[in-house]
Image (cartoon, helix red, strand yellow):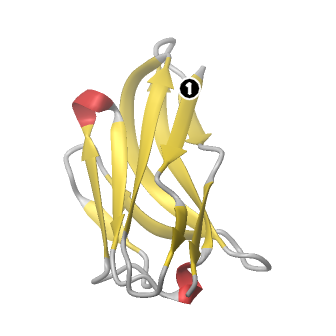
Amino acid sequence: QVQLVESGGGLVQPGGSLRLSCAASGSIFSLNAMGWYRQAPGKQRELVASIMARGDATYGSSAKGRFTISRDNAKKTVYLQMNSLRPDDTAVYYCHADVRSDDGLLLSSWGQGTQVTVSS
């Protein structure tokens, strides 16, 4: 019913930048909170940042001051600009969205994940 497709991951050197994108499609009546989570090997999935439809943003402690989340409601897309990347930012980054579908269901949707590797 709802698909989230991430892009923009890859390999970057420490101190570098990456911009992740996540586009939502399908039977979407409205998108509420959208966000990014990440999971490193052997660790639990953690919140990186989330943003409400009107633009209110919340950041996890690891992202504050380095990452910026934004969204384009017309494009049903959320972005994560990541600067000053460190090796401990290496993880699979997952897009998440709280969706109200066309038939009125409230859905918690996840993307397939995109790998971010920070290494020299």
Residue 51: x %, y % from top left: 32, 55
Towards the viewer: 109 or 118 = 118
Identify which residue is drawn at 35% across, 84% down. 84
Q: Which residue is mark 1?
A: 2
Quadrant of the image containing the N terminus: top right
Identify which residue is drawn at 54% across, 23% down. 105
Residue 44: x %, y % from top left: 71, 74
The three-letter amino acid code for the residue at tag 1 is Val
* Residue 56 as seen in the image, left or right of residue 42: left
Towards the viewer: 107 or 23 = 23
Please say if 87 is above or below 68: below
Quadrant of res 111: top right
* Residue 116 as seen in the image, left or right of residue 97: right
Please say if 15 is above or below 106: below
Please say if 80 is above or below 52: below
Quadrant of res 108: top right
Identify which residue is drawn at 53% across, 38% down. 5
Residue 55: x %, y % from top left: 21, 52
